[in-house]
Image (tube, rainbow, N blue to C red):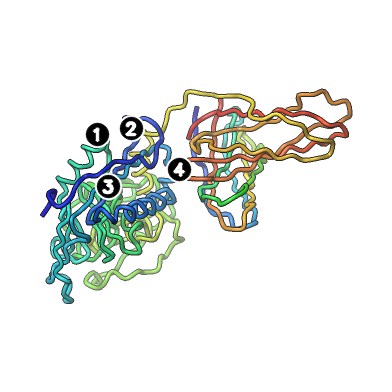
Amino acid sequence: MQVGTQFTGPVPAGATQKWFTHSWPLAANVVWTVVPTTIGGSGAQLEWDVQVQLAGAGLLTYWITVKNLSATEIQVQGRYAVLS
Amino acid sequence: MGAADGAVVSTTKIVDHGPDASRWCLVILSEGYQAAELTKFHADAEAFVSKLFATPPFTENWCALNVFRVDVSSTDSGADEPVACADDPSPGSGKTPATFFDATYCVAGTRRLLAGDEALALATASAAVPEVDATVIIVNNPIYGGAGGSVAWFSTHPQASDIGVHELGHSAFRLEDEYGDAMDTWTTGEPVEPNVTTITARATTKWHELIAATTPLPTLVRGAGNCGGPDSEQPSPVPESTVGLFEGGARARCGIYRSMHTCKMRILTDPFCVVCKRAITAVLAPHLPQFSGPYVGTQFTGPVKARQTVTWFTYDWPACWHALWTVVPSTPVTPVGGVRWETRVQRTSRERIQYWVAVTNDTDQDVTVDGRYAVVASV
């Protein structure tokens, strides 16, 4: 299984930030998770949504939208795991 | 002065990602802390570890690391501060405290260079942690200083943690400084370190595969007759993220190049450049945990009333795991519709994550749901 970090970066307090990543093979079963790397005080810090686009030639573009649910800027890490 | 001026008190594993034989083991030693000051050392070590975790590429390779704190007490507090130092006209205090590793400022005539008995440091680290891969020593003195030899030394100056990460770049990853301060022109051939080069040919320069065809080479030069001046920051002619050849590095102002306009090996508070990140990752990545899963199970079961949302939380999940969450009803639902869920996440510590799963019942009937997890990989 192939795993890794595709993106890292800040998301301001209460804001939504979108990352995209392209040229993923259509045949690859890819799952995305996002975790904060900033330690949070109490409560959930973020949620995320994944959107996907067949960009042509059998390649996918993923759009990962991360929402900061906290009152302070957080650093986030976008992770992928290729299941097959 | 030396080992007779203190004692090795204890060893504590403060970051634990599994077997020491498989992880990249970092040992943090204390120098110049009296026994009563070891609690301060604990806080200083914690601050350094937090900085390291927050510094890419350590962040994304964190699961490769185990970190140990070794408490070493000294008879006296601080480090030697020689009165005279070749590069500094203002006199030092002349203090010579009795400390375990005998650390001193003004190594090699440079006031800010701070180091001590490296052989004793290496022996102490390996006695405490036989699998040690790298050693840093925090010196209990607030004057700016550090050095990166076979071990990394740094003081408790307000920039201590940044100094420590920089010096670790030298000692553990063979990275060169990327500033010029000690010599006008580099004259000793191609260096072995991965982050500086004398080669300016596009096809053969050290990080050629990272340089876009449109990036001019060299990308930034100091200009003829300008090698004797201070290593002041020149504006970059290209975007900051550009990889190219920027003149100045390995403590020489001219005749040697670094890969980006700035880097932590040049300016303490900046991120590592792409080439340094690559070099660090090459060392750490082989120590990332091998995954033996997947692991699946039901984490929670409970009712959700019609048109209501219920949030469950579950804590103490290893941050190294890729955990996926799904929710299914465990009772039949007659009306049209179903349940949906959103996963939220909180980092409760460097090594632990808490998940919050919010389940919404979109039907007109009360249901019971199962919250399922699948750990599909580790970082």
Query: CB atoms at circles 1 and 4 under 8 Å apart?
Result: no
Is the residue marked by circle 1 packed among few (<14), some (14-19), or many (20+) residues within 10 Å? few
Give how far across and how far down residue B344 sits, in percent: 64, 43
Please determine if labels 1 and 4 lie on a single subunit: yes
Residue B71's disc is 3
Tags 2 and 1 touching, CB below 8 Å: yes
Task: Check the residue under mark 3 and report the chain it is in.
Answer: B
Q: Please give left or right for residue B211 compared with residue B89 in the image.
A: right
Report x, y in % for residue B104.
17, 60
Residue at (70%, 40%) from the top-left corner? B311
* Of the two numbered discs 4 and 2 in the rendering, the one whose residue sits closer to the viewer: 2
* Residue bearing mark 2: B20
Residue B244 x/y as whole percent: 37, 55
Q: Nearer the viewer, mark 3 or mark 1?
A: 3
Q: If you read the primary sequence from the N terminus, does the residue marked by circle 2 or circle 1 appear first?
A: 2
Q: Nearer the viewer, residue B269 or B74?
A: B74
Disc 2 with disc 1 on a shared chain: yes
Residue designated by label 4: B60
* Outermost residue to the front: B36
Secondary structure under the numbered disc 1 in the rendered image = loop
Could you give the CA–CA distance between mark 4 and mark 3, rounded to whole angstroms?
A: 28 Å
* Residue indicated by mark 1: B130
Query: On the rendered structure, is A3 left or right of B366?
Result: left
